[in-house]
Image (cartoon, helix red, strand yellow):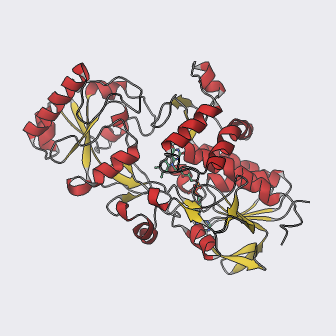
């Protein structure tokens, strides 16, 4: 007989865990701190890093789990927990089948930084959460919003439940409370290099689960690797981000002095760090009308048109007028764009740019008016670090032993990404390890039973 399972957090990891546990026959209680389900998941771009899919095959993209694994380790600079990466790479195809049978719809696939081939598969994340929620409700989940888990209930060194709103809920516990991108306190303590970055991510991303688990001796890792993402306007509203990655389509990035300062093809995390070193911790993505026309329509992060309509993207008929509109020295901006166009024609960029993104895509000149400038800075969207877990999503203590009764999945966990993050790997990890946690927590095992 399956055990009762209590899950904290109703993002992708929490819902995947709930469905998996219910399908094992468990009684499941899902507790969400905020007034609605979704967390950072529903704010995300919806990209899932998957390899060897039918969609890739149909487009003639050759990819394999082994290549995904190699790329994840390369992006993570070998600082990853190899067992987690291997489990994900080997199991993501099965996870995709599982999600598709429960309503996931993939829309398209594109190349992102850190990928040898195009493997960022896009979905509408709110639709994925809704589909999993519908399945969980059909299977009888007990779901509460405005129910912040405040404490783990521990007896004889075993986690036997949680306390929320003054009431105890007993069962095997899965922490799926997300990261801490919205906690000033934890960011100042654990990621001081990001002190000038904006804080995005779901409003509930305040590190609650992390603190609770560490409070009972859970291990944690990778805090040194927290990085912001470049491309969000300095005035961004955390609940409705306006992240634009036009630089991966060919835009250049200039600082307030009108000068480039970074190879725009590298990871947006590295660009994020470089931006924080610039005057005012801000910069501009500069591009021309040809890029705007070529940009994919209605693809979040890549379509500048809605930002133009909202007045966030500045435009002007000439580069001189654009410089004036954004208060940047005209001569400097003209010189930067002229020099860059020479690089596009002849190569030899002093900052090292050869491609649009990573090692793919030919550079494009900036020459056809009107011209555009997107004021941008660095924002911490997610914290890719946290609790130490094994491949079954069991939380490990400081000595590497599983803490009886406790599982964790999603952004709350560390180890998977290592030094940096591949686009799509955070939603992928939330779904894969959420499902693993749900199954593991539900399965009856006499040694682990409270
Ligand atoms: C703008 C943006 C774009 C992104 N784009 C991508 C992308 O395209 N691909 C990708 O892979 N990743 C992306 N990410 C990162 C990704 O969205 C997250 O890492 C992932 O969704 C985390 O899922 P999760 O289920 O672990 O956490 P969340 O989805 O954040 O869910 C955690 C839930 O737990 C709740 N909670 C917190 N504390 C408690 C508590 N004490 N008790 C009960 N509930 C609690 C929260 O309110 C929240 O609802 C993006 C993030 C942002 C912000």
The image quadrant that residue 55 belongs to is top right
Quadrant where ligand 1 appears: bottom right
Q: How many marks?
A: 0
- Visible residue check, residue 215: yes
- Visible residue check, residue 424: no
**Residue placed at 82% from the left, 65% from the top?**
4
In the image shown, does 193 or 144 lie closer to the viewer? 193
Identify the residue at the far right of this view: 1
Q: Is residue 261 above or below residue 219?
A: above
Q: Is residue 281 above or below residue 192?
A: above
**Residue placed at 57% from the left, 56% from the top?**
411
Identify the residue at the far left of this view: 331
**Residue placed at 75% from the left, 77% from the top?**
157
Question: In x, y percent, where is residue 115?
Answer: 50, 34
Query: Is 429 left, or right, of 232 in this rendering?
Result: right
> Which quadrant of the rendered structure holds the C terminus?
bottom right
Query: Is 384 left, or right, of 347 in this rendering?
Result: right
Q: Is residue 354 above or below residue 30?
A: above
Question: In x, y percent, where is residue 3?
Answer: 85, 63
Query: Is 292 left, or right, of 152 in this rendering?
Result: left
Question: In x, y percent, where is residue 442?
Answer: 82, 59
> Which quadrant of the rendered structure holds the N terminus?
bottom right
The image quadrant that residue 99 belongs to is top right
Q: Is residue 75 above or below residue 436?
A: above
Question: In x, y percent, where is residue 353?
Answer: 30, 32
């Amino acid at each position: 007989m399956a055990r009762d399972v209590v899950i904290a957090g109703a993002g992708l990891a929490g819902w995947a865990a709930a469905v998996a546990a219910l399908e094992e026959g468990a009684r499941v209680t899902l507790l969400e701190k905020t007034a609605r389900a979704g967390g950072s998941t529903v704010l995300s771009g919806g990209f899932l890093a998957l390899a060897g899919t039918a969609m890739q095959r149909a487009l003639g993209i050759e990819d394999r789990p082994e290549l995904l694994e190699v790329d994840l380790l390369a992006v993570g600079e070998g600082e990853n927990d190899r067992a987690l990466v291997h489990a994900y790479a080997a199991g993501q195809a099965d996870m995709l089948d599982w999600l598709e049978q429960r309503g996931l719809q993939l829309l398209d696939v594109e190349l992102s930084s850190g990928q040898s081939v195009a493997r960022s598969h896009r979905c509408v994340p709110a639709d994925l959460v809704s589909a999993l929620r519908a399945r969980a409700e059909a299977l009888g989940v007990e779901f509460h919003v405005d129910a912040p888990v405040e404490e783990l209930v521990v007896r004889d060194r075993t986690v036997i439940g949680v306390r929320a709103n003054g009431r105890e809920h007993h069962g095997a516990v899965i922490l799926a409370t997300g990261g801490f991108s919205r906690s000033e306190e934890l960011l100042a303590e654990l990621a001081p290099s990001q002190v000038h970055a904006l804080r995005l991510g779901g409003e509930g991303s305040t590190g609650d689960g992390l603190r609770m688990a560490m409070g009972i001796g859970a291990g944690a890792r990778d805090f040194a690797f927290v990085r912001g993402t470049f491309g969000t306007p300095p005035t961004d509203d955390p609940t409705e981000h306006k992240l634009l990655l036009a630089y991966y389509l060919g835009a250049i990035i200039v600082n307030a002095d009108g000068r480039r300062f970074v190879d725009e093809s590298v990871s947006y995390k590295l660009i994020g760090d470089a931006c924080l070193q610039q005057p005012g911790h801000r910069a501009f993505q500069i591009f021309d009308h040809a890029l705007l026309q070529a940009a994919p329509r209605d693809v979040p992060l890549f379509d500048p048109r809605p930002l133009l309509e909202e007045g966030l993207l500045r435009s002007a008929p000439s580069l001189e007028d654009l410089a004036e509109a954004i208060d940047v020295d005209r001569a400097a901006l003209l010189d930067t764009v002229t020099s860059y166009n020479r690089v596009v024609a002849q190569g030899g960029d002093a900052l090292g740019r050869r491609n649009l993104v990573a090692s793919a895509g030919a550079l494009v000149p900036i020459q056809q008016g009107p011209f555009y400038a997107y004021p941008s800075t660095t924002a911490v969207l997610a914290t890719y670090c946290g609790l130490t877990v094994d491949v079954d999503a069991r939380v490990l203590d400081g000595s590497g032993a599983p803490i009886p009764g406790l599982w964790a999945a999603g952004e709350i966990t560390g180890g998977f990404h290592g030094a940096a993050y591949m686009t799509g790997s955070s939603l992928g990890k939330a779904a894969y390890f959420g499902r693993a946690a749900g199954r593991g927590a539900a399965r009856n095992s006499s040694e682990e039973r409270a």
